[in-house]
Image: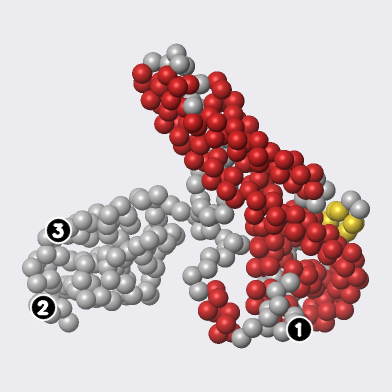
Amino acid sequence: MGCGGSKEESNPNEIKSQMKETKVAEFDDFFKTASEFLEGLEDLRARFQDTREEMNELGRTDELVTPSLIEAVKVFLWSVSAHKDGNIKAAGLSFETDPPAFTVDCGHMDYKTYDFSAAFKELVGGLVGAPQKIADLTGQVKEITEKANSLKSGLKEKVDNSGLDPMGKMKATANAGVNFTTVFKGLAKAPEVLKQASEAVTDVKALLPKIKDLVLDADTVGKEAAGKGHKKMDEIFEHYQKAPKKTPEQVKAEHKGKKPKNKKKAKKHAAGEHKAGEHKAEGHKAEGHKDEGHKAEGHKDEGHKAEGHKDEGHKAEGHKDEGHKAEGHKDEGHKAEGHKDEGHKAEGHKDEGHKAEGHKDEGHKAEGHAHAEHA
């Protein structure tokens, strides 16, 4: 049975297939079969839904009045050609329709062109076994639905007669309940996923014969684009995509709150792992930034500031801060140059009301300046 891995961003369309062990043979055998069915369903969904969405996003077809996957493919091929100075064959491009196969070397090209090539290969490669897979999964839907309903209705009786101890019976009942929820959620999505996959196979197969002509014509745009220094997919779309486009206002409104699928995820660091001048966390700012809080060279935080930062508050060697500054403070987990600060210390100075360079004040002094309003 499938087991959970590390979690990144959750896809609301994803079909889960992980199952928990019940230690009741009849249930575990069924949940294993159901898990394999759901995995197959998710593979189809991801290949023909997520992959097409990613290609359309990379090719920016959602910015066209009439979105079309073939327009995204055009932009991609023009970009590949431009990267090779108007000679697409130099990218090792090969395309076949029977069986469908696509190869191209997009190494050393911009990341969108590279990502599009990977998605396109996956989409084309999935066509070979897709029709049979769709037929097999469609045939399983009724069988799995009926078996799930039957087992769920007899759950208590079968667990009571399982020979498990009381604690084992409680766990079996709870795990079976979780599994049935997973199964029925997946089954509810099955009809639409199978319908979309079938339509996608038809659409992509219709697209394939046109690809060869697009490849032959790609160098016309590619050569012109390369001569003007336009190679990235975004540049190609802006300058050479002639299909009618939506207005910038329409695009902005449609994109509001939408998370790009191809956006690169920033590496997350655990608290206490931030190094001065290196990482940017949910709280830390680098030199020259303004924030309500604490800063220490390279960190962004709702807290302390260092070198040239401005805030409503107290001064320490030319710094203005509401929340206590001194080069390299430690706040809620962040260290810089050996200084520790919850009550904020800097280079051997101690303060409850903030000290710097040997000055003591509750109204906060720095280098002989007394202030209550912190000029």
The quadrant the N terminus occupies is top right
The image shows residue 362 at horizontal and vertical percentages of: 8, 68
Q: Nearer the viewer, residue 325 or 66?
A: 66
Q: Amino acid at mark 2?
A: His
Check residue 242 in the rendering and tell me which mark sits there, or answer none.
1
Give above or below for 223 relative to 327. below
Which type of secondary structure does the marked residue at label 2 adopt? Answer: loop
| Residue named by callout 2 | 371
The image shows residue 257 at horizontal and vertical percentages of: 49, 70
Q: Amino acid at mark 3?
A: Lys
Q: Amino acid at mark 1?
A: Lys
Which type of secondary structure does the marked residue at label 1 adopt? Answer: loop
Measuring 29% from the left and 65% from the top, which residue is drawn there?
302
| Residue named by callout 3 | 350
Frontmost of labels 1 and 3 is 1
Measuring 87% from the left and 71% from the top, which residue is drawn there?
214
Q: Nearer the viewer, residue 236 or 50?
A: 50
Q: Nearer the viewer, residue 322 or 347?
A: 322
Give above or below for 65 relative to 114. below
